[in-house]
Structure formats: C-alpha cells, structure tokens
Image (cartoon, helix red, strand yellow):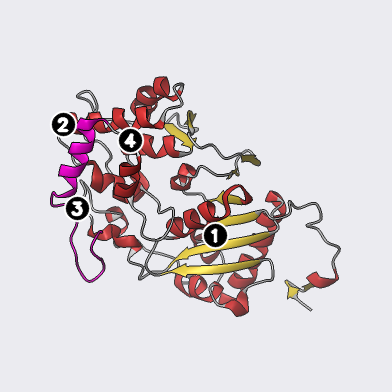
Amino acid sequence: MRIIQGIDVDALPDQFEGCVAGRTLVLDGDGPCYVIASTVKRLDTAIRNYQQYILTQLFLTKSQDCRIHLTARDSTKAGRYNVKAIKPYQGQRKGKAKPSLLEPLREAIALPENWLPEFDVTLHRELEADDGMMHDAYRLGPNSLIWSADKDLRMTPHPYWEAKKGVIMQGHPFGYLYMEYTPSGTAKCLGQGPLFFWAQMLMGDQADHIQGILRLDGKKCSHVGAYNALYPLERTGDINAIANYVLDAYRAIDQNPIPEGYLLWLQRWPGDHVVSYFNELALSDENRRFVYECFYRDWYSVGESGAEIA
C-alpha cells in the first residue's frame, strides 16, 4: 500500500494506461526541488509534493518511467568552475539566498526509500544534472524524452518535451532555431538539436554567466544577432557549415572558442567534452589549426575541484 496525501494510490485505476511503452522521461530535478522547497515548511511534505509532481509529469508526457537528475551542492560540475572563460561560470549566483529546504529535499529525494516504482534519482557530485540527462538521452535514443526548464538541454538531438505547448518535439539530428518574445518584448532565440549549441556559442547563456562570442562582425551578439546569423545557414542542413561559420567568427577576433564551448557543451557520455566534438567535425584547415592552437592556450586550471582534460 502506498499512501500519498492520504490516498491509497495502489487502489486507484491505472491512470497511466495508454503510456508509450519504453518511453523514459529524463527530467531535470533541480528546478522542481527549488519550487517545492520555496512553498512548504516541512521536509516530509516537500517529499510528497515532489513525488506527486513526478507522477504528474509522467501522466502528461505518457511516459512509462522517469530518470531524475539532480546536481549536488558540492558538485564539481565536470570541471566547469576551473575554466578560464570570459566570465566566471555561474558567478552571478554567488551569495544569493536559497530556500532552507532546498538541500535537504535534494538529498532526501535521492534516497531510494523516497522513490516510487515509477522513478529513480541520480544525485551528481562530479557532473551537472544536465550532463547526466544527456548521457541518458544518448543511451536511450528515441526512447528518451528530455524535460528541463533550463534551455541548455535543447541541444539534444533526441525527443524533447515542449512543456509550454504540451507537445513532444521529435528528435532532430541537425536542429532548428526560432524566435520567441516575452510579454515585455524581449527577444529569445530558442531551438533544438546541435544547431542550438552553435547559437549559444554566439549569444552565450546569461543564466549561467557565459559570454559567448565577444563580437560578431564588430558588434555584440544578442539573441537576435545569433538567429539572424545562423538562420540563413539553417536551410543548408549542414552542421559542418554552421561550425565553420562560428569558428571563423571566433578566429577573426582571436577569441579562444574552447572555454565558452566547454561551459556550454553537455557530455554525451562519460569523458566527453567539447574538444572531442570539434574533432568529429569536418572543419576547414584554418579552423582545425585554430582549435588545435587554442587547446594549448591557458584556459583551464587544475585544482582541487577539477581534473586534467585529456
């Protein structure tokens, strides 16, 4: 018997009838932890609310089960803090107050005794949750369904849950871009697939304090600038053309693309990083030499929280 908020859920009819066999929801669990920890006072209540939230997401996405990923407070985040980028990674978050229940809930929901049969949880201390999610996406392929409020996961080439629309965006090995506007009129470049990674290489990621390119054709590169630059190339369907265009722009101003790329890139499997990805692409001779030379610049500090980049 499983009692959740006073209801024997085992006695209920199967509300998940009709779920897609084999579909696994790969979920960023940090956001729900923050929201729930901000709205309750007791840990046991927070755990029950979290369980209910996961069941709701399973129902909405018609998923058979769920893999939840969390980032521990002491996580080394795949060495991202050691990267000497234009801006310190997530530097704007230091000193910001967090809900007092946030860390207790994160640690508690990672304990197997607080799981339900429909889900399991990984609390990452060496990676970020985003990296663990991408590992799952590549391992499960089309059976994975990524859901995160963080736009970084949009670079997945596999299915993505577009929560605002309530639809599943099918996998896209190349990707696409589109513009969205907030109620105040602020433009945001969004999309899916590897193409979205290259858009972020231009426009950066304000949420994680990542600059992106310093200048594109002599100007600061906004979301609109990144979209306008890449949209004409999107129609080629050639990710190598996109990569060479972006690396040409970095090379034109002699900005090392590896630090920004290392921060933005999400591991596809253990040990993966952005230089591995660069080496897989059909880069021009000039860009291949540029990436090779940039790799040996001073861009990574080995310290207590990091490791050598192989």
Residue 112, visible in the rendered structure? yes
The x, y position of residue 14, in whole percent, is 83, 61
N-terminal of the pair, mark 3 or mark 1, is 1
Residue picked out by circle 1: 32
Q: Is residue 99 above or below residue 89?
A: below
Q: CA distance from mark 1 to mark 4?
A: 27 Å
| The N terminus sits in image quarter | bottom right
N-terminal of the pair, mark 3 or mark 2, is 3
Q: Secondary structure at mark 4?
A: helix
Q: CA distance from mark 3 to mark 2?
A: 18 Å
At a point 69% along the width and 54% down the height, the residue shown is 63
Q: Secondary structure at mark 2?
A: loop
Amino acid under disc 2 = Ile
Task: Check contact, mark 1 vs mark 2: CB within 8 A.
Answer: no
Amino acid under disc 4 = Met
N-terminal of the pair, mark 4 or mark 3, is 3
Based on the picture, tell me whether residue 285 belongs to the magenta stretch. Answer: yes
Total of numbered circles in the picture? Answer: 4
Q: CA distance from mark 4 to mark 2?
A: 15 Å
Residue picked out by circle 4: 203
N-terminal of the pair, mark 4 or mark 2, is 4
Amino acid under disc 3 = Lys
Q: Secondary structure at mark 1?
A: helix
Q: Which residues are magenta?
A: 284-310
Residue picked out by circle 2: 253
- Occupied quadrant, residue 215: top left
